[in-house]
Image (cartoon, grey):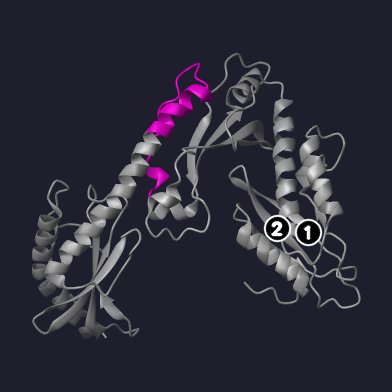
């Protein structure tokens, strides 16, 4: 990623931050504070993941005094966040943060990351203190039961047109290193799954707490292996707390993740079985085996077959799309079929039989697709 307009030392620090942070931090709104040469960019906004949402902090360098550490401007809802204040109780973290600032070295590319991580740790503690001050017995009880779990984040959420609520982001299956379970894993960041728990704040006139809203959230890259949207959450029973709910949910997730990893080998075996009928694929996803393309022919008619696999394979059969190598539409784009999912299939078949029956279908479908291509040519 190029940082044109930023002084080299600032660019080095920013580059290191974006490439080595354990969080997927992004940058936006780069601008200049240099009154002498406004072409020199020395300020930017960091978009930092927190509690399954994002917070934005402005980082203010002064290119006229390049040896000084940057200032930070926090969001308008965090006016009480004073990370280096003696009011904050976490003295060890404050000391580390102050040490990082006092030992600032503008030629050390790692320094910005150290400070941002220190500030984020302080922000986690700040939000936890805010939530702990809420006059709601259930929220206080929930906090007391899950504080031993690592990585939990929480925050207050309020608005003019909606009631106050508390949001928890609870990391799940932390004993599983999903990245290491996938051979040839391309992921830069550790893949994570969270349970988002939203508690409406109990009002004085309400006698019983309402059921919290629950939602599974994962890092976006994980969808190549496993979709949390396919997981059916266990019911939340009356009187239940998070400490009771989480073990059963994690047991379910662990089993489904292991099944998803095993499904990679099933998809690979199926693609290999197809080669007996269609030859070697033109291209295929080598890591997750979620797609493959073969070149085949029916008489003089040559076409490609694109296979798209869901994470639910073999329970859900592949989706097919045919693409002619000899017909172009009026936009000079190869003619393609609609997506095909209706053909003989059973998840109980051996992969060899799956491949054989599907290729029998393709033999018959080739004539229909050729006719479709010829008709498409006649329309322009």
330 is higher (above) or lower (below) than 89: below
Mark closest to the chain's N terminus, 1 or 2:
2
13 is higher (above) or lower (below) than 373: above
Give the percent coordinates (x, y) of residue 30.
74, 67
Total number of numbered discs in the rendering: 2
**The C terminus lies in which quarter of the figure?**
bottom left
The answer for how far apart the CA atoms under marks 1 and 2 are is: 7 Å
**In this rendering, does residue 27 appear at all?**
no
Q: Secondary structure at mark 2?
A: strand
Give the percent coordinates (x, y) of residue 101.
83, 53
Give the percent coordinates (x, y) of residue 68.
87, 62
Q: Which image quarter: residue 85?
A: top right
Q: Is residue 278 left or right of residue 127?
A: left
Q: Residue at x 49, y 19 (%)?
A: 240
Give yes or no for contact between labels 1 and 2 (Cβ–Cβ under 8 Å): yes
Residue pointed to by mark 1: 59
Within the magenta stretch, is there residue 241? yes
Q: Residue at x 71, y 43 (%)?
A: 121
Q: Secondary structure at mark 1?
A: strand
342 is higher (above) or lower (below) than 337: above
Which residue extends farthest top? 207
Give the percent coordinates (x, y) of residue 192.
50, 46
Residue pointed to by mark 2: 46
Q: What's the magenta region?
A: 226-251
Q: Is residue 369 left or right of residue 186?
A: left
Comparing 232 with 111, the one in front is 111
């Amino acid at each position: 990623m190029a940082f044109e307009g930023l002084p080299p030392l600032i660019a080095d620090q920013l580059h290191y931050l974006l490439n080595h942070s354990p969080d997927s931090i992004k940058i936006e709104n780069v601008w200049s504070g240099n009154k002498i040469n406004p072409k020199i960019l020395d300020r930017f906004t960091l978009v930092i993941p927190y509690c399954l949402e994002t917070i934005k902090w402005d980082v203010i360098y002064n290119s006229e005094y390049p040896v000084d550490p940057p200032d930070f401007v926090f969001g308008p809802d965090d006016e009480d966040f004073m990370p280096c204040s003696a009011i904050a109780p976490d003295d060890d973290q404050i000391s580390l943060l102050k040490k990082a600032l006092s030992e600032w070295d503008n030629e050390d590319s790692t320094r910005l990351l150290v400070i941002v991580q220190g500030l984020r740790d302080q922000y986690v503690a700040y939000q936890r203190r805010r939530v702990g001050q809420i006059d709601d017995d259930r929220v206080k009880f929930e906090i007391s039961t899950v504080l031993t779990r690592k990585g939990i984040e929480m925050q207050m959420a309020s608005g003019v047109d909606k009631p106050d609520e508390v949001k928890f982001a609870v990391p799940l299956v932390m004993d599983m290193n999903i990245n290491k379970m996938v051979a040839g894993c391309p992921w830069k960041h550790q893949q994570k799954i969270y349970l988002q728990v939203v508690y409406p704040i109990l009002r004085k006139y309400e006698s019983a707490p309402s059921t919290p809203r629950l939602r599974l959230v994962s890092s976006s890259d994980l969808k190549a292996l496993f979709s949390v949207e396919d997981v059916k959450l266990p019911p939340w029973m009356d009187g239940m707390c998070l400490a009771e709910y989480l073990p059963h949910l994690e047991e379910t997730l662990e089993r489904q993740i292991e099944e998803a990893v095993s499904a990679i080998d099933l998809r690979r075996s199926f693609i290999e079985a197809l080669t007996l009928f269609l030859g070697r694929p033109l291209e295929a996803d080598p890591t997750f085996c979620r797609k493959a393309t073969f070149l085949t022919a029916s008489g003089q008619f040559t076409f490609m077959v694109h296979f798209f696999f869901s994470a639910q394979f073999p329970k859900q059969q592949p989706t097919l799309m045919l693409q002619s190598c000899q017909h172009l539409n009026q936009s000079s784009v190869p003619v393609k079929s609609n997506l095909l999912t209706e053909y003989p299939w059973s998840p109980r078949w051996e992969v060899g039989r799956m491949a054989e029956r599907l290729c029998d279908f393709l033999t018959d479908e080739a004539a229909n697709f050729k006719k479709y291509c010829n008709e498409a040519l006649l329309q322009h």
